[in-house]
Image (cartoon, rainbow, N blue to C red):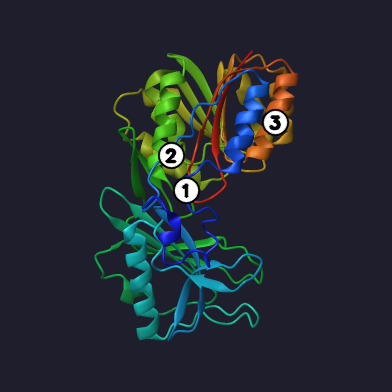
Amino acid sequence: MNNLSQCPHYPTCMGCCLTTLADPEAYQDAQLYFEKQGMILPPLRKGSAIHWRTRAKLAVRGSSAKPLIGLYKEGTHAIVDISQCSAHHPKINEGIALVKEWMRKERIEPYDESAHQGTLRYLQLAVERSSGKVQLTLVLNRPLPHVNLLYSHPLWHSVWVNHNTRKDNVIFGKEWERMAGETFLWENYENTAVAFLPQSFAQANPEMFTQLLVSLKKQIPPNCNLVEYYAGVGVIGLVLADRCQSVICSEITVDGKSCFEASKAKLTRFPGEHISYQIGSADDLLNLLPKGNVILVDPPRKGLDPKLLKALQTAENKILFYISCGWDSFKRDCDQLLAAGWKLQSAEACLFFPGSSHIETLAVLKK
């Protein structure tokens, strides 16, 4: 199905704003931007239009008799139920159906924002592709004594509870509790097993992310010393490790390191002592810059942290790989890097979110 308007939830669900896999406006803007730098952007990389999403965060509202699980309508807090979403991996929709059945049977009340009452606020469902099982997180406004009634179904990889009693729109609280099942969800990228906790960031479109990793692996200089900022659980560094002499991954979150260490223990083709993980913000870990002749950054949509951006402008590193999920912030950062003497060598764009106007960009800059 290439026409996304065939999804039963289109157009009331705002998850898809485009009906086809036509090149979004952001890609057209990217073509013009790189053309001004004397570069022709290759065709936009695209994958499947359906069943690509293996991770979903969904709000839970309605009532225990008629639960609604889905996304907010644009500009409102009214829920559009998307239990048959065409973008979802089929196992996510299966999981939604099981949770709804459980809510009706056990009379689990969804969260009511206006009264700050009710129990179940959000769901997160993540598919482990190798097993076809789903890591389920229930975000609760108050304790729930009979979560264990969910455990027995073979769909679940694990069941987690996140406690969130805040009165704002933040999805997750700080407390996580594993109720049943395995600790880590494992995903395989380019023959590299990578561990994830439910609070870990992970790409929702593994098909397209793998294509990006393949491109990176072809371009990374052999036997380089790689320093990666905004590494998450270290997926990219782990996948590229066998091409490098050394790898240092860094990230601000503590849980990322536990996933990284579990994944590192499974590496069979790279000496473990040459790949490490540092905890801290990018701005606080500028001391890592001199340790790499190749720098890789994969920042959030806001772009590079100010101190890191400033340090990169005068850094002596030879190559910079910039992976961007925010096109406007990438243009801002890239303009400053070019003005400081970096030169664009290549660029490409991927459609990680079919039906959206969003693109993921990989640019290579050299001194």
Q: Is residue 94 left or right of residue 220?
A: left
Place of residue 237 in the rendered image (x, y in percent of width and height, measured from the top left):
45, 30
User: Mark 3 and mark 2 in contact (Cβ < 8 Å)?
Assistant: no
Q: Of the two numbered discs 2 and 1 on the same chain, state the one appearing first in sequence.
A: 2
Looking at the image, is 65 positioned above or below residue 359?
A: below
First in sequence: mark 2 vs mark 3: 2
- Kindly identify which residue carries mark 2: 46
Three-letter residue code for mark 2: Lys
Which residue is rendered at x = 53% and y = 68% of the image?
A: 12
Check the image and report above or below for 173 versus 314. below
Q: Nearer the viewer, mark 2 or mark 3?
A: 2
Sooner in the amino-acid sequence: mark 1 or mark 3: 3
Cβ atoms at labels 1 and 3 below 8 Å apart: no
Q: Look at the numbered discs 2 and 1 and tell me whether their residues touch, using CB distance below 8 Å.
A: yes
Which quadrant is home to the C terminus?
Answer: top right
Secondary-structure class at tag 2: loop
The tally of labels here is 3
State the separation of the CA atoms marked 2 and 1: 8 Å
- Which residue has dot 3 on it? 333
**Is 106 positioned to the left or the right of 62 in the image?**
left
Residue for point 66% across, 66% down: 75
Q: Quadrant of residue 17?
A: bottom right
Secondary structure at badge 1 equals loop
Circle 3 sits in a helix, a strand or a loop, which is it?
Answer: helix
Q: Nearer the viewer, mark 1 or mark 3?
A: 1
* Residue 89 pos. (x, y %): 35, 56
Residue 354, numbered circle: 1
Q: Marks 2 and 3, how far apart in space? A: 25 Å
The one nearer the camera, 157 or 57, is 57
